[in-house]
Amino acid sequence: MPSILLVCLGNICRSPLAEAALRAEAERLRLDLIVDSAGTGDWHAGEPPDPRAQATARRHWVEISGLKARQVTQADFRRFTHVVALDHDNLD
């Protein structure tokens, strides 16, 4: 089964929104897909998404408040078939 990890800096803004959007689209299309998100930094680990990201998600009828930030691990590169950096700074 395809699995996608979406990565940004702190895992509290871009990647949780992208995770929710991709999950919603995969569900709409009835795709069997594993989706998760993580950050390259660890300073927000365990925290919920930023309130602005939560508000943006709610405007699109998506709830992300239950997500918790985490840092990318070496195991992620074995677990996921695709790892997507959401900006050039986190690609390196």
Image: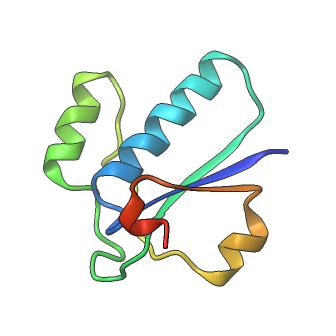
Quarter assignment of residue 28? top right
Tell me where residue 54 appears, x and y as whole percent. Answer: 23, 43
Q: Is residue 31 above or below residue 47?
A: above
Residue at position x 72%, y 39% from top?
Answer: 33
Whether residue 40 sits left or right of residue 26 in the image: it is: left
| Residue at image coords 30%, 22% | 60
Q: Residue furthest top?
A: 29
Instruction: Identify whether 54 is placed above or below 84.
Output: above
Total numbered circles: 0
Residue drawn 32% across and 22% down?
A: 61
The percent coordinates of residue 82 (x first, y second) are 70, 54
Using residue 61 as the reference point, say whether residue 37 is left or right of it. Answer: right
Instruction: Residue 55: name its quadrant.
Output: top left
Determine if residue 68 is in view: no
Give the residue furthest to the right.
1
Left or right: residue 91 versus residue 33 is left
Q: Position of residue 30 (x, y in %)?
A: 72, 20
**In the displayed structure, does residue 84 sit left or right of residue 47?**
right
Residue occupying the point 39% across, 50% down = 16
- Between residue 46 and residue 15, name the one nearer to us: 15
